[in-house]
Amino acid sequence: MTTRLVDLGPDDVLWGSALPILQELRPHLTRELLAQILREGAPQGLRFTAVVENGRCVAVAGWRIIFGTSAIRKLHVDDLSTTANARSRGHGATLLRSLAQRARDLGCQILDLDSGVQRHDAHRFYLRERMDIRAHHFTLELT
């Protein structure tokens, strides 16, 4: 099996296999909504990196560099998802390690992400990868 990391551009043909993986995490995500997110997110620094195995995406991460007062410069992971039939094969860890190295190379102080409170398997994975729980994330619905 050939496995490689790929940065996905907005018109990348690999989105055909990457979008369904994101939809496992974000079921509301349509092809049209993804196109809008790619258009509007790119100027804000949103990027996507995928693990590709034998020409198909098996894991994908959306991420950006954020400057702020708490960490000064950090790499924030918006999405990290491995397709259900490829879990527990190291793809998520590969993505996380790759993003951590990219963060170091870009002068970031930390890598962080938010995870839904119901995602217990993901939490076990993040803790196993030596991530710490440092905050609560609060949300106000505006609808």
Image (spheres, helix red, strand yellow):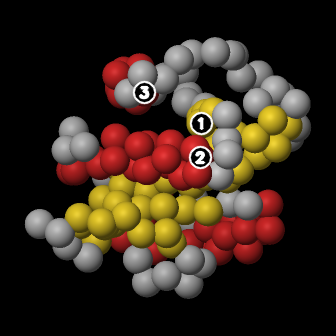
Q: Which tag, 2 or 3, sits closer to the chain's start?
A: 2
Q: Are marks 1 and 2 in contact (CB under 8 Å)?
A: yes
- Does residue 76 appear to the left or right of 43 in the view shown? left
Q: Which tag, 3 or 1, sits closer to the chain's start?
A: 1
Q: Which tag, 1 or 2, sits closer to the chain's start?
A: 2
Please tell me whether residue 50 is drawn above or below residue 110 in the rendered image.
Answer: below
Horizontal and vertical percent for residue 6? 42, 69
* Residue denoted by label 1: 111
Q: CA distance from mark 3 to mark 1?
A: 12 Å
- The mark found on residue 126 in the picture is 3
Q: Residues within 10 Å of mark 2 (few under 14, many from 20)?
A: many
- Does residue 103 appear to the left or right of 16 in the view shown? right
From the viewer's side, name the closer residue of 29 and 3. 3
Q: Secondary structure at mark 3?
A: helix
* Residue denoted by label 2: 103
Q: Amino acid at mark 2?
A: Ala
Task: Tell me the residue at 68%/60% (across/down).
Answer: 46
Horizontal and vertical percent for residue 61? 49, 53
Quarter holding residue 16? bottom left
Horizontal and vertical percent for residue 96? 43, 43
Q: Residues within 10 Å of mark 3 (few under 14, many from 20)?
A: some
